[in-house]
Structures are given as structure tokens and as C-alpha cells.
Image (cartoon, rainbow, N blue to C red):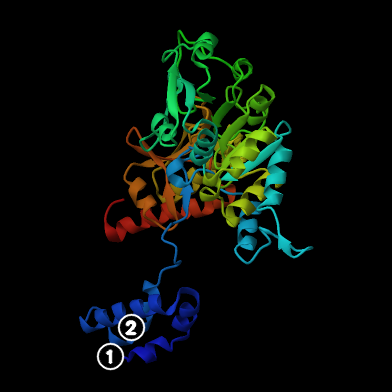
Amino acid sequence: MPRTDAILADPRLQAASTRLGATVVKRAVSHAQELARNATIAPAEVADAAVAALPTSLNTTRQVINATGVVLHTNLGRASLSPAAVEAVTAAAAYTDVEYDLTSGTRARRGRGTLAALQEAVPAAESVLVVNNGAAALVLATTALGGGREVVISRGEMVEIGDGFRLPELITSTGARLREVGTTNRTSLADYADAVGPGTGCILKVHPSNFRVEGFTSSVAVRELSGLGVPVVADIGSGLLTPDPLLPDEPDADTALRQGAAVVTASGDKLLGGPQAGLLLGKASVLDRLRRHPLARALRVDKLTLAALEATLRGPATPTWAALRAEPAQLRERAGRLADQLTRAGVPSEVVSSDGAVGGGGAPGLTLPGWALALPESYAQRLRLGRPAVVGRVERGRCLLDLRCVLPDSDAALAEAVLDIFRSQFTDGPA
């Protein structure tokens, strides 16, 4: 059995110690030595086995190819950052002037460049603030304005925002008292007016972004609510900053502010296509009140998020923007090329129509026509467990790989992942 120090002297393992740390490398060596002791491998193969057992990264979160057709897939981390944002995060990983003025050598406003970029992106915003997610933005706004007082909200907007988190519970946790008005399907301006009084902290207007109520319905616009004499907090959810013709039914921050909202809250990792963040935009007097609230410090965003958000706001079109606008004809052409390549290799595959979705609680019911590669259902799990991991969807007994969110330069990797599974059936059993 080779001595441990002799194995660790292998140049490959020395390089790995620098990249991954000595503890990880020694663990791989110990495992390889145990295999040799059990006669699973020969003693001469210990170093090779240790190298093969090393992880590719210290991060257990694996990058995946999103072939689900859902642009903002919450379980896959929602928005994929743009190359500009990734570059900004890398630069911000070192020491930065995030809260430091290099000219004067004194403390400066934290994330001032990001805040300026956000305010420039929403002309109607007098002031802006960034916290660590959309729910945090809503909690800060309702705590500062409604803590110990009443928050008036329509019953039709008492939503569950995902993973069991319900808006009523979120708001009441701040110390505010909810005052529900109207009914599930119909709420009028008079309902709000009757509820507003000396004990009202704010009116909360929530966009039901992950469901739709149709039929005999009515709701009240921000413009009407802003005339009732109390601050209106408009939670638009998905983070659309200005109107987008592709999403005509999705509310945007600039319009809500022009209609009189005191504060607009939104997420940064949805339609904006940036990192997870909570955006607060609104009147200077109200935002100053929020900024000075003790809770704002607890919800403060980190330097990496600030860097990614600024690059998203100032940089080129995001992957989210591109995926939402992917041309069906181009998707079909790419799927056709992949199907031809796989069919020639013997993989049973075909091109089928596939409707994508915005996801992430945005634009419910909006269909994004596209195309997908159809494979046998048995491929789905093995693709998820492969390298790279490919996440598609199973539909009607087939594994569908929708190309909407797959970058064109990843087509080759996608094809190779499928071919690896096809080849493995001859050694591991049927795919």
C-alpha cells in the first residue's frame, strides 16, 4: 500500500489541494486506500482513484440546463444571470467600495451605484431601496407604515405566495392588523373607503400574480385608491419596471407610481432577470421612513447582489428577456437539427410543439409557443442525474426537452448528454 504522503505528492493531488483544500483531498485519498485494502482496486491505482473521486467543485449546488420551457422556474433559481451580471459578481467577490468613498476616504451610501441605476430605470420613482427578496420588501413596507395599525386589503388579494407562505400571516407577523374588505371576486372603492379611518396605516394592493379570477369580478385600481388619503403599497410581484407589450396584463412599477402609489414592492429575480432581491420604489418621504426603520438593517442586501443587480439594470438584454421572446421558428429549427443528429445515432427522438410559461408567479395563463425534443420517458431521470444535469419535463409518457431556456451554444452539450445515456444502455441496461 503506497504511503499517504507519497500519494499526496502526486502533482494532480497537490494542485487539487490548492483548489479544493487539503481536507477534501485527504478524504479522497483515504477512500481510495480503503478500496485497495478491500482488493477492489490495485495499490498502484490508488492515486488515480483518489483523483477520480475528487469533486469538481466545493459547491454542492449543481448547474443545470433548464429544458422545462419555464423561464422563471422557482425550483431552478428563477432568473439566469446575464454574462454582465456574472462578471460583476466575480469582481465584487474581492474587497470593494460598496460602502466607502475612495475620494474622501470615508463611509459612503451603501450600493449607491445600484440605487442610482434602479432609479434611472423607473422615472416615476423619487427614491429607491433594495432588500434581500420580494417578501422582505413587502414586510418592510407594511411594518414601517402599518405596524400596530390596520392594513386594508381586498379579500381577493389574500394570496399564498408559494411554499405555504400566506400573505395574511406575513403581514400580521409585522404587528399590523389586517382589515379585509370586499369579497373574493368583487371589491369596490366604497369597500375601501368605508374601512379607512384614523387607525389605518396603509392600503395594500396585491397583484395576484400566480392565479387568475375570471367571470363576475371587479377590483379597484391604484389611481382610485390613492385618493383615499392614506399611503398605498402596491405589490406588483414579478418585477416589471416599465410597461412591456409582451405582457399587457402585468402591472409595472412606473405606472403604479404615476397612479399615486406611495410604495411599489417587487422581486429582482423575476421579469427583471436579475439576482434575488426585493425592490422598493416610491415617494422620497416614505422611502426615507422605510430606510430608517430598524428592520431595514436586518434585511440589507449583500455586495454580490448589489453588483449583479446594477449590471442587470445597466447591461445588455438578460437571458430572461431573450427566453421570453424566443422565436418559435428558430426553436423548431434547433430542435430539428438535434433530432436529426440523435436519430442518426439511433436515439428515438422527434420534434413536437411545446408551450412554454413565464413561471415564478408571473403572467399566469400566458402561453409561449415553442418546440421541444421528445425522447422516451425513461431518459428524464437519467438526464437529471447526468453531467451536465438536464431538467426537462415528463408529459404524456415522453421526456420533453423544451429549448426556450437553453442557450444555443448549449445545444451540443444537450445532445452529448442524451447520447451518453443512449450509449450507456449497452453496458448499464436499457435507457
Q: Residue at x 61, y 15 (%)?
A: 224
* Spot occupied by residue 409 in the image (x, y as percentages of width and height): 58, 51
* Spot occupied by residue 425 in the image (x, y as percentages of width and height): 31, 55
Out of 212 and 3, give the one closest to the viewer. Answer: 212
* Above or below, comparing residue 214 to residue 24 in the picture: above
Q: Residue pushed farthest left?
A: 38
* Above or below, comparing residue 305 to residue 161 in the picture: below
- Label 2: which residue? 46
Q: Quadrant of residue 173?
A: top left
| Labels 1 & 2 near each other (Cβ < 8 A) | yes
* Above or below, comparing residue 2 to residue 243 in the picture: below
* Spot occupied by residue 177 in the image (x, y as percentages of width and height): 43, 27
Out of 284 and 418, give the one closest to the viewer. Answer: 284
Q: Residue pushed farthest front?
A: 198
- Element class at badge 2: helix
Q: Quadrant of residue 25?
A: bottom left
Judged left or right of residue 350, residue 273 is right
Total numbered circles: 2
Type of residue at label 1? Met
Out of 84 and 415, give the one closest to the viewer. Answer: 84
- Label 1: which residue? 1
Which of marks 2 and 1 precedes in the sequence?
Answer: 1
Number of residues whose C-alpha sits closer than 10 Å to that of mark 2, classed few (under 14), some (14–19) or many (20 or more): many
* Above or below, comparing residue 130 to residue 33 in the picture: above
* Spot occupied by residue 321 in the image (x, y as percentages of width and height): 62, 38
Type of residue at label 2? Val
